[in-house]
Image (cartoon, rainbow, N blue to C red):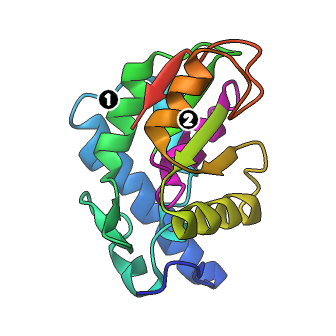
Amino acid sequence: MSTNTIAETSLEEEDKFVQARLNMVENTIVARGVSNEDVLRVMREVPRHKFVPEELVSQAYADHPLPIGYGQTISQPYIVAWMTELLELKPGEKVLEIGTGSGYQAAVLAELDFVDVFSIEIIPELAENAESHLKSLGYDQVKVKSGMAIMLARVCSFRCNHCYSCSRPFASTID
């Protein structure tokens, strides 16, 4: 399974993905009760098909997890939207994501455009792939680290500057 390739798509294919994404938001996310306008906006914007392996792109907007390699999955879109809504984030807050995976949840958080996103992944190859995907899609502000998530999270919550430059504590942790 290819985990480090972003599928190249034509404008026509991109239009189909945009429509699939909009349908996904209405039919699986709004229909299940997610109502935060910021969350709905970012779910309509973030191209999930760019975070799944090339051979699974056709399933990118189905509401189920997909394998991304190394025994891991990209979460189903509804769960990503629901968890993001539950965080009740405010401008200027910091979020620590534990388990970067493909980088999709980090992109969703970054697309909010008012929180700082830090992400930790224990599998180095996934961390590298996610960071590369995020940067190639313009999410340069997401900070990705590879390492033992629990140890790094404890370090960060105590603000001792061993994992990220912590001038303020994380408002939320998501995994």
Q: Is residue 113 above or below residue 107?
A: above
Residue positioned 40% across, 25% down in the render = 85
For mark 2, give the secondary structure: helix
Quarter of the figure that contains the N terminus:
bottom left
Picture quadrant where residue 169 is located: top right
For mark 1, give the secondary structure: loop
Q: Residues within 10 Å of mark 1 (few under 14, many from 20)?
A: many
Q: Is residue 100 magenta?
A: yes
User: Which of the numbered marks, if any, corresponds to residue 152?
Assistant: 2
Gap between marks 2 and 1, in whole Å?
A: 31 Å
> From which residue to which does the magenta span run?
99-116
Mark 2 residue type: Leu
Residue 129: % across, % down? 60, 69
Badge 2 or badge 1: first in the primary sequence:
1
Residue 74: % across, % down? 37, 59
Quarter of the figure that contains the C terminus:
top left
Q: Nearer the viewer, residue 16 or 9?
A: 9
The residue pinned by badge 1 equals: 34
Q: Is residue 148 above or below residue 90?
A: below
Residue 120: % across, % down? 55, 45
Mark 1 residue type: Val
Residue positioned 32% across, 29% down in the render = 34
Q: Are marks 2 and 1 in contact (CB under 8 Å)?
A: no
Picture quadrant where residue 56 is located: bottom left
Residue 160: % across, % down? 70, 19
